[in-house]
Amino acid sequence: MPAASTHVRVTAIPSVTDALKAVEALLLGAGQRTARRNAWNSVLEDRRRAKDRVEAQHVMEVASGRTSRAT
């Protein structure tokens, strides 16, 4: 008599990101999704540039011998 074959089905649990993307796909059209992602990428880029400006200002103040009151 042949051995019984056991098959185990493994289903990955979706991450929160995957779940949000699925909801987004249901609620928004492709163009709206693209616009939202582009807007978010712009926000992230603005934050990066602001951080770079603060760091550059700090370097300039240190180089000139001044210290910022904010630090």
Image: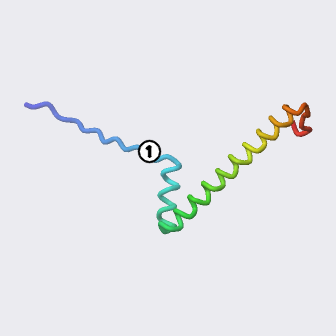
Nearer-the-camera pick, 29 or 60:
60
Relative to 64, residue 36 above or below: below
Q: How is the image coloured?
A: rainbow
Amino acid type assigned to the residue bearing label 1 in the image:
Ile
Relative to 29, 44 lies left or right:
right
Q: Which type of secondary structure does the marked residue at label 1 adopt? A: loop
What percent of the width, then of the height, locates residue 46?
69, 52
What percent of the width, then of the height, locates residue 3?
14, 31
Relative to 70, residue 26 above or below: below
Nearer-the-camera pick, 4 or 37:
37
Relative to 66, 41 lies left or right:
left
Relative to 40, 23 lies left or right:
left
Q: Residue at x 31, y 42 (%)?
A: 9
Relative to 13, 7 lies left or right:
left
Label 1: few (<14), some (14–19) or many (≥20) C-alpha neighbours in 10 Å: few
Which quadrant does the N terminus fall into? top left
Q: To which quarter of the image does residue 65 belong?
A: top right
Count of numbered badges drawn on the protein = 1
Q: Residue at x 29, y 38 (%)?
A: 8
Nearer-the-camera pick, 15 or 40:
40
What percent of the width, then of the height, locates residue 10?
34, 41
According to the image, label 1 marks what residue?
A: 13
